[in-house]
């Protein structure tokens, strides 16, 4: 009877490889990494420069040598190779360290309005800010308001001759959010977002979310002045008995703040009012740009980016600057 052991083992290996190639989950990707790493460490791929040990005495000599050289990982892998088992899979120093944080895609608010086609389906939020932002959004949703946001995924700009780093590194650190500018300034009676102030006051106009449907938390009607803009100018219009929820205090609870003093738009093309930044955890005179980048990007991406020669720059309270 023919020996089918080799054929069966080959079929099982082929099936395993097919599964790993087709799977896209993090666990499958980690398995792919482990298998490739083991292949690189196998003697058939990386031949030994010394003869195979002839007896247990020589094996013991190798084990003692690795112990003397403080190589417990290699010693454990050698034992696994002798026994024919998978053995441990400790990192040997040449695997790429994974960033601690990531950008998470959240479903975006897309209220019905002429601006709806311009509102992205999702918004990218840094993983350590997700919980706080979701709580802020719930506060608005409970009051029947919405918050259409912009925060696209931004890869690090690659280094190239004559290319200077952006003056503001915060967008590449996942520390910015923008309201969708097209959702405001057109018609404050129906826009999802408006820039308003108490009627008759001289206070600056601040962004507020219009209550679209009654929520679980009631919002009292009030009288407002609101900005309505065209391509050349902005004018205040009166809104009586309108319901708005101020946006800045809600986002502040998630760590995001507008520019101070708050920029007042001069036309429908003005967008500075929509920009919010999160500088929580940045310590003036201490936090380095390189440390912040390493939270989101692998070392190779940072080294090939336009920020590569500014990794030692330090946060000064408003930006990263040369110490």
Image (cartoon, grey):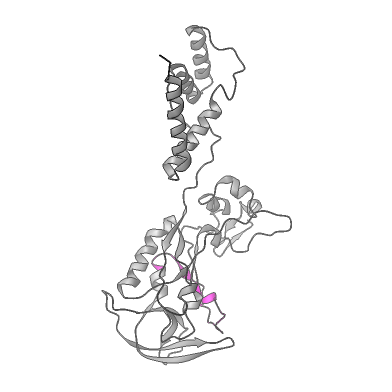
Residue 178 lies, in percent from the top left, at: 49, 70
Quadrant of the image containing the N terminus: top left
Residue 100 lies, in percent from the top left, at: 47, 48
Could one spot residue 134 in this view of the protein?
Answer: yes
Residue 298 lies, in percent from the top left, at: 55, 47
Please say whether residue 272 is one of the residues in the magenta stretch.
Answer: yes
Numbered range of the magenta stretch:
252-274
Where 120 falls versus 289 (above or below)?
below
| Predominant SS along the magenta part | loop
Among the 4 quarters of the image, the one containing residue 111: bottom left
Among the 4 quarters of the image, the one containing residue 226: bottom left
Residue 130 lies, in percent from the top left, at: 40, 59
Q: Residue 239 or 37: which is nearer the viewer?
A: 37
Direction right: furthest residue: 162
Q: Residue at x 43, y 64 (%)?
A: 255
How many labels were placed on the picture? 0
Left or right: where does residue 241 sit relative to residue 171? Answer: left
Q: Residue 166 or 6: which is nearer the viewer?
A: 6
Q: Residue at x 37, y 68 (%)?
A: 137
Where 125 falls versus 5 (above or below)?
below
Left or right: where does residue 233 sit relative to residue 251? Answer: right
Where 43 falls versus 102 (above or below)?
above
Left or right: where does residue 243 sit relative to residue 299? Answer: left
Left or right: where does residue 191 sit relative to residue 169? Answer: left
Quadrant of the image containing the C terminus: bottom right
Q: Residue at x 55, y 29 (%)?
A: 40
Please say whether residue 270 is one of the residues in the magenta stretch.
Answer: yes
Could one spot residue 89 in this view of the protein?
Answer: no
Q: Residue 195 or 279: which is nearer the viewer?
A: 195
């Amino acid at each position: 009877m023919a020996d089918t052991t080799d054929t069966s083992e080959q079929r099982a290996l082929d099936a395993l490889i097919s599964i790993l190639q087709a799977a896209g989950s993090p666990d499958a990707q980690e398995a792919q990494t482990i298998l490739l790493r083991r292949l690189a460490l196998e003697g058939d791929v990386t031949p030994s420069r010394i003869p195979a040990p002839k007896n247990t005495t020589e094996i013991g000599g190798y084990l003692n040598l690795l112990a003397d050289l403080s190589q417990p990982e290699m010693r454990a892998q050698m034992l696994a190779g002798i026994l024919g088992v998978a053995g441990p899979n400790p990192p040997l120093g040449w695997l790429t360290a994974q960033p601690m944080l990531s950008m998470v895609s959240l479903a975006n608010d897309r209220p019905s309005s002429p601006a709806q086609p311009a509102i992205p389906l999702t918004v990218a939020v840094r993983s350590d800010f997700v919980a706080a932002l979701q709580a802020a959004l719930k506060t608005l949703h409970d009051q029947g308001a919405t918050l259409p946001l912009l925060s696209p995924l931004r890869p690090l700009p690659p280094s190239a001759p004559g290319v200077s780093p952006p003056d503001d590194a915060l967008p590449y650190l996942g520390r910015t959010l923008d309201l969708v500018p097209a959702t405001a300034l057109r018609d404050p009676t129906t826009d999802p977002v408006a820039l308003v102030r108490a009627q008759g006051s001289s206070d600056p106009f601040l962004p507020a979310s219009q209550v679209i449907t009654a929520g679980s938390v009631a919002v009292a009607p009030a009288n407002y002045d609101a900005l309505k803009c065209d391509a050349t100018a902005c004018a205040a219009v009166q809104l009586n008995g309108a319901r708005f929820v101020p946006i800045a205090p809600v986002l502040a609870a998630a760590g995001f703040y507008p520019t101070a003093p708050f920029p007042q738009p001069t036309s429908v093309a003005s967008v500075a009012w929509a920009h919010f930044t999160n500088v929580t955890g940045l310590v003036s005179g201490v936090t380095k740009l390189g440390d912040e980048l390493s939270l989101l990007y692998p070392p190779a991406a940072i080294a090939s980016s336009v920020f590569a020669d500014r990794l030692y720059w330090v946060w000064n309270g408003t930006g990263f600057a040369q110490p």
